[in-house]
Image: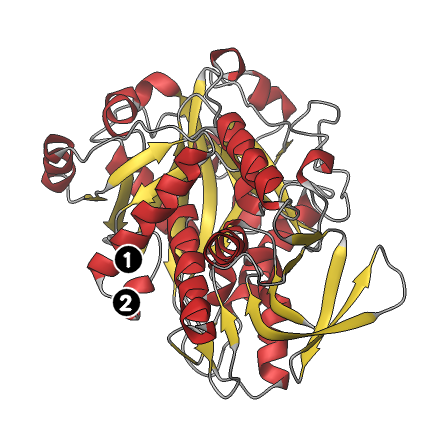
Amino acid sequence: MLDVAIIGGGISGLMTAYRLASKSPALKVTIFEKGHCLKDRHCPIVERKNASCIHCKPCNIMEGAAGAGAFSDGKYVISTEYGGWLTDVLSPDMVMDYIEQADSILCSYGATKERYIPDDELKRLCIIHDLHMQQGKLKHLGTDDNLQTMRHMIDDLSNRVEFCYDTEVTDVENMTITYKEHSNEPRSVKAKHIIFAVGRSGSEFFQEWCRRNNVSMRSNQVDIGVRVELPFIIWEHFSKRIYEPKIWYRSKLYGDITRMFCFNERGHVVTENTGGILTVNGHAYKDKAKKSGNSNFALLSTLRFTQPFNEPIRYAKTVAALANQLSGGSVLVQRLGDLTAGRRTNDHRLKASTTRPTLQAVPGDLSLCIPKRQLDNIVETLHALDKIAPGTANHDTLLYGIECKYYSSRPSSVDFELAGHNNMYMAGDGSGFTRSLSHAAANGLYVADKILNREA
């Protein structure tokens, strides 16, 4: 019998385990992680051993110890203005307090203490051109330093809680977890408290479990678009002062919201594999030797579906899968000038581009896979952004697709405890309440405190 079982070893699961082990060392806590331990997580693309995805199972970028956040560029948002929806349940002051607590824990394992602060002058520049910049304090750990911080944290926790790697949880019923280790025969164990901290990669498993166990769900938004890559000097006046320009724009054509976020100064575009579907993302390193001459950012159009359709994640994955088919099992890249001219980018045109790609993607035509409405929003927004960062809408600006951010449907719950299921909780991005390292970490600490209070 376990005292606490945590399904998922991402940042929310790690923070939950940290708090439990620190405040009540006698508790028997186990983390079940589908992917590998951190030292065995090696992406052939990131390590420059392969130019394209070879479909590792599990994907070492998306799954494994420290979760998808381990290989992110390590942005830590210290704000309630964006990063999640914890304020739907907790007061803003409480959310900020937990974010700061999580930051202190990460700093104790080596995370940087440097913070970027909001800049009203840049915000005013955006407003003048009908662009709207969200602000908050921000830390940039960098892909390399973030990975080191996670390694230190996990090494310490390994002495205090049990980690079960390469272990897939297949079901949870009557406070009993059924799981398979290294593809062996199923095993089971009971627990007094169970936390679903499955992250984005485990969201479909969690949703299916909720459906089977009569837990109603509410769909969140889904964002579909591209990863934009251009010379770093174009956005340097923003990135040097606030690091990440997080800007949204309401299109004049449709009145839709398009968001610019996940900015990576002098970074690299990378692929991610979620359930066999390839999408794009961005990384940025602290190590100067690993920096590129480009910056990249996500530019995504937000969709909120209404009845009768209630599967936004499947919609996003279908769009991404179409891009995979068109590219022969990879991701696409297209110059903005070719897109607006109504022609595909080919090898010859890509080689002529003044913006050199950091990812070996397949030249193609994004208009064949991104729906027209979303594509119109993206192009209009690029020209709007060009007013505050001239050069953004240049002919040779590169667009990689598909990038999508889908946020788990939010199950019915009371204070993060699943409705109708006592002592079963949810935390992190898989819960539908967070979409950032900081908010997921804060959520994990809060759930741990809830369990500690109940145990006391």
* 119 displayed left or right of 389: left
Tell me which amino acid carries mark 2.
Leu
Quadrant placement of the C terminus: bottom left
x, y percent for residue 169: 72, 66
Quarter of the rendering containing residue 89: bottom left
* 153 displayed left or right of 322: left
Label pair 1/2, CB-CB below 8 angstroms:
yes
Quadrant placement of the N terminus: bottom right
Q: Which residue is mark 1?
A: 95
Q: Residue furthest right?
A: 185
Q: Residues within 10 Å of mark 2 (few under 14, many from 20)?
A: few
| Front one among 88 and 297 | 88
Mark 1 secondary-structure assignment: helix
Mark 2 secondary-structure assignment: loop
Tell me which amino acid carries mark 1.
Val
Q: Residue furthest front?
A: 26
Answer yes or no: is residue 261 visible.
Answer: no
Q: Residue at x 55, y 23 (%)?
A: 357
Q: Residue at x 27, y 21 (%)?
A: 240
Q: Residues within 10 Å of mark 1 (few under 14, many from 20)?
A: many
Q: Is residue 246 above or below residue 430?
A: above
Q: Which residue is mark 2?
A: 90
x, y percent for residue 139: 34, 34
Quarter of the rendering containing residue 223: bottom left
Q: Residue at x 53, y 26 (%)?
A: 144
Marks 1 and 2, how far apart at CA:
6 Å
